[in-house]
Image (cartoon, rainbow, N blue to C red):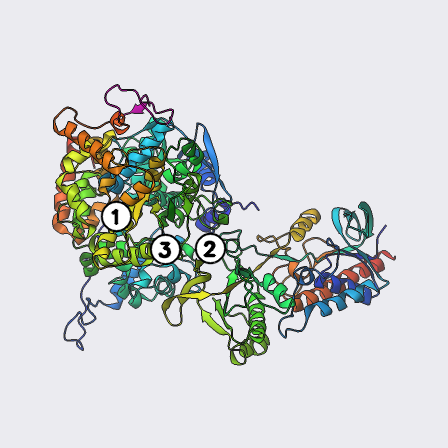
Amino acid sequence: MTVAAPLQAQTDPQYKVADVAGYTEVSYDAKARLFEQVKSDLRFGDYLYGCYECGICVGACPSAKFYDFSPRRIAQAAAREDVELIYQQMQEDIWECSQCFSCLRCPRGNNPGGIITIMREVAVRNGLASAKEALVGYSRIIYKIMSTGTQVSPDMLGRDAFPDWGPETADVADNLELWRRALPPETMHTTSTGWSVADRTLVELYLIWFETGALDMIAQVDPSLHSILQELMEDRLEEEGIEL
Amino acid sequence: MTIPMRAPVDARRLANPGDEPVVDRRPLEDPRAELLELEREGELIVQKIDREAISVATKYGREKRIQKAHLWHHKSCGQCGHIPGYSTSIFWIMRKLGYDYHDPHDQTSCTAWNYYASATSNTAAQAAVAVRNFAAAYETGYFPLIHCGTSYGHYKEVREQLIRHPELRAQVRDIMTKLGKPLVLPEEIVHYSEWIHALRHEIAAKQVRDVSGIVATVHPACHYHKIVAGDAIYDPDIYGGQRTAVVTGLAEALGAEVRSYSTWFDCCGFGFRHILVQRDFTRSFATLRKIEVMKEEASPDVVLTHDTGCVTTLDKSQFAAQAHGRNVGLAVLSDAQFAALAMGAHPYRVCQLHWHSADYRPLLEKMGIDWEKAWAEFQSDLRRLESGEKRYLDWDDADGLHDGEQPVAGPAGMNTTIEVRDAI
Amino acid sequence: MPSETVAVIGGGPGGLRAAQGVADLGGTAVLIEQRAFLGGTPVAENYCGLTPHGEPAQPQIHQMVDLVTVNPLVEVRLGTEVAGVAGDPGDFSLRLHRAGTAATQTSGDETIQCGAIVIATGFGHFDPGRATQMYGYYEFPDVITQPDLEAMLSEGRVLRPSNGQPPERVCFVQCVGSRDRQIGNEYCSKVCCGVASKEAIEIRELLPDSKVLIFYIDMRMYGYWENEIYWPAQEQHHVQYVKGLITEVLPKGDRLLVRGEDTTMGRPMEVLMDLVVLSVGMEPSPGTRELARLLGVKQNKYGFVEAVGKPLDPVSTDREAVFACGAALGPADLEDAVSSAAGAAMKAVSYLRSRAVATGN
């Protein structure tokens, strides 16, 4: 999978700044191309049929209660192929979805949360500012999953990492190594991974990231993280004698 | 009414461009039948349930079989990483019931937390990760059991994508070939709470602590019952078959009182990305829409749920809200930890409740558990580790047996000769 | 031996009209009804007022019944099912099985001859508990269906089943069991919008202090229903129509919490209700399914009998000399049922007459 070329900002002589809407405006064609990427995704036909515009998805949606967000508007915009609105939704809306799939309540069988997942992937692959912004502070999770094979680890419960979770979290941090040794399951004595992952398994995961282009997607969002991971993975694959 | 599910999907895929596409796509009614059909066509291998299994009914009546023993534990990142008592309880219950299992090192995360949070992945990567794990299980002959609700929901979706899209199968097959693994899927994708539900009467038979005075509210995980909604357990005797039966079935089998509340179907607010970088949303949702409503309408002693993210969210969101004087303060446990406690498990050695945030002590007191004594016991275990007497606590320590001691009291069948395979 | 009799199977409004129509044309009919009484679903499910004008249903249906039972050209078989069919078009023999009923008849079998058959076995209402739509029909006493409400209206009282009190806030949930890909009933059941509005008017008349809402996807108000039901419901009776389908019904205190989106206002909505009425859709009745199987006629994927010559011939099946009418063919209102029934009767009789002419009988 190749990463898309970066989008060209569109300067309209009427505006003093290109991002008067709060995000970078681009040409209609660029927006249409972004939508084409969404529409040509393998899953799009599974996720969108017709839309009754009945709002049953909104009634079930948690994000709709806290943000100005509506899975119905996502499905409607996609059904109407309203590329302007879709581009706007790719700025903030899609990152408000909590991916709970309560919207699968839809009587037509639509999957607004799924459409959003595709839109997010397109945003990431095209290096949209919204994607970069949404994922600020998130890189450590990407680093953890891509380098260790588990998504979260005990050592992420740092003393000051989650102060709003209560003092018990600090207790964990203070006693981490000892408390991990006090776990009966044999695979769980780790601190830097969720459980003990075999070396070979990690390498298999690296191969999957490379072969499917998942690693490339990070290049747009966090270039330095991407180079760190790429180097790490290439070295390990070489050690194991695996040809890409 | 039998509907030939292959025909409509194929008609859509194979129709000539000039033809009207047949858009008749009901959710796959019988994914198992679809998989077996693909196996007959040589497209993939299906790992079969080949031992004693219990039948359960799913939402639209399809029978699902849950294998009892010889299971491959597909672990959860969030459980193992942040709520280790959750995973420990699952293993402990399985040991107590006398069922052998495999706890693998050659398992990766399902990577779905990352995927739903950041979309820095794609369909092929997610499918390949799933199949790689299933292949690892297949190679051992142990049948996969999924610990996390999101892994489970995500894998159900991956299964549907692989069934519908031959090009995706081809891509994943190529990658598996490079890894020297087959393209294999299990006959059923089973969540551990389904296993607990199927075995709830066996669990209740080994119960030693009375929970008849305990009031519980149940929070069902979105990804358990909303993704591929037809493949989830429903039971006409539980909620009249109107809501999923897991967790509630277990609680009732143990004798606890389960009370309803008006936000039962609401998400917990985990949000995948939100709980890490937009915490006010998660915290607001979990407290305003779930915990406060449960407290006000049901006054439970414990909130029971069956997913990593849900336990994390509901347990951890209450502290900050408490600081603002909100009506929170409910113990949050997984069904596994609750069942383990009912079966006599140690609250710290097994359930590892010291990793939890919301206060669980009133619950333990109500269950007749002397948590101060238990904490002292656990502290002495820690001293043994610190002194170098032992490197790790093991399953005998979990039951208070020290190196070769026989059990003094406890449920029958508490044996230490479970056949457990370690790393390959 | 070719027969000039038309067998009409099903004694609801469609079957009654078809038997009547055969007799009007001078033919003979045998009307076979599974239940112990004629009138079909409107009688079995206590319809109170007919849509659109709300005039009492039972007297009207009984009038149709009387016309048939006194007609010398129509023989009626109550408590009877068709157990088997043999023979050819124009010369069928039907094996009938009569169930024993309390006082009036003993059980037994009988074979009759007929030349043509009219399927009038109708529909059944969708069971809202079956597909777990999260409306709590079997959990909460105050969640009822349209037929349940008709039974209440027939008694002249609308009360909350939970406490026997008149409800202050009532809502209707449209499209329950219809227009839904997940359940499989993808079609629209045609009548529920009109029926809900008629019932809403009736509630407002019985309980002037009540607030009545209808939550819908689309308001299906064909033809004169627009001005005869929809406008009066809004204008005279102040029924509130909200475009937004309900996601779930949950208990809150001693009332019900109903959740959805008020789409035209663009915001999520949770409102408390005393009584929730589910506008349940139509499905083929067990009788329709069984008879279609026995007769070997083509059914559509929902199990209704397929009218193969639509739209200009809405009553012929794919089997010669076998016709169908009413809700056995798909969602139908009473006008549809009696219209297609008359059409089926005409086609059945003309079929037999033209055979008789052709064969010189």
User: Circle 2 is placed at which residue position?
Assistant: C134
Q: Quadrant of residue A103?
A: bottom left
- Does label 2 lie on the same chain as label 3? no
**Which segment did they paint magenta?**
B401-423
User: Quadrant of residue A215 in the image?
Assistant: top left
Q: Nearer the viewer, residue A241 or A196?
A: A196
Residue C327 located left or right of residue B47: right
Q: CA distance from mark 3 to mark 2?
A: 12 Å
Instruction: Compare marks 3 and 1 and give the one earlier in the sequence.
Output: 3
Graded by Cα atoms within 10 Å as few (under 14), some (14 to 19) or many (20 or more), the crowding at tag 2 reads some
Amino acid type for the residue under numbered disc 1: Ala
Q: CA distance from mark 3 to mark 1?
A: 20 Å
Q: Is residue B26 left or right of residue C347?
A: left
Q: Residue placed at 17% from the left, 50% from the top?
A: A162
Q: Residue furthest top?
A: B404
The dot on residue B266 is 3
Q: Is residue A23 visible?
A: yes
Whether the magenta-drawn stretch holds residue B403 is answered as: yes
Q: Chain of mark 3?
A: B
Residue B270: image tag? none
**Which residue is depicted at the point 48% across and 53% down?**
C182
Give the percent coordinates (x, y) of residue B339. Answer: 36, 37
Picture coordinates of residue B295, whole percent (x, y): 34, 54
Q: Amino acid at mark 3?
A: Asp
Q: Nearer the viewer, residue C222 or A64?
A: A64
Q: Is residue B191 above or below residue C10?
A: above
Tag 2: amino acid: Met
Residue that badge 1 annotates: B358
